Amino acid sequence: MGEQWLNEIIKALKKLGGVGTLHEIYDQIEKNGGIDLSYYTDWKSQVRKHIYLHSSDCDIFKGTKGGENDLFYSVKGKRKGSWGFRGFGSS
């Protein structure tokens, strides 16, 4: 299921031009309809979790900075709620 969340987040960020606030990402994921959000009590926490797990800007990131799992970056710094997709424009 994690892969599906990542794909939805990436799709949302691409539609937003590579960067967006968490609220814009949530709105785009709702519009895309790729995941049955009614299945989750708090689906927005799934979005945040997958962004944080795949960003070297976050404390819970376990990969290598700049590695293949370092997909997202904090646009305005920690706790600002604005994220970018590192691979935007490359695919």
Image (spheres, helix red, strand yellow):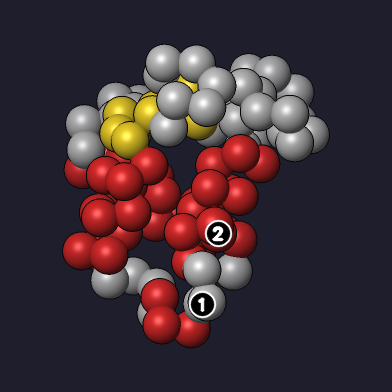
Name the residue located 73 percent from the left edge and 29 percent from the top edge. 59
Kind of element beneath mark 1: loop
Name the residue located 38 percent from the left edge and 29 percent from the top edge. 82
Relative to the observer, which residue lies in front, 64 or 42? 42
Can you say whether 2 is above or below 80 in the image? below
Neighbours of disc 2 within 10 Å: few (<14), some (14-19), many (20+): some
Label annotation for residue 46: 2
Kind of element beneath mark 2: helix
- Quarter of the image with the C terminus in it: top left
Q: Is residue 4 left or right of residue 31?
A: right
Amino acid residing under circle 2: Gln
Inter-mark Cα distance, 1 to 2: 9 Å
Q: Position of residue 88 (x, y in %)?
A: 34, 28
Label annotation for residue 40: 1
Name the residue located 21 percent from the left edge and 31 percent from the top edge. 17
Locate residue 62: give its quadrant. Answer: top right
Q: Which comes before the other along the chain, label 1 or label 2?
A: 1
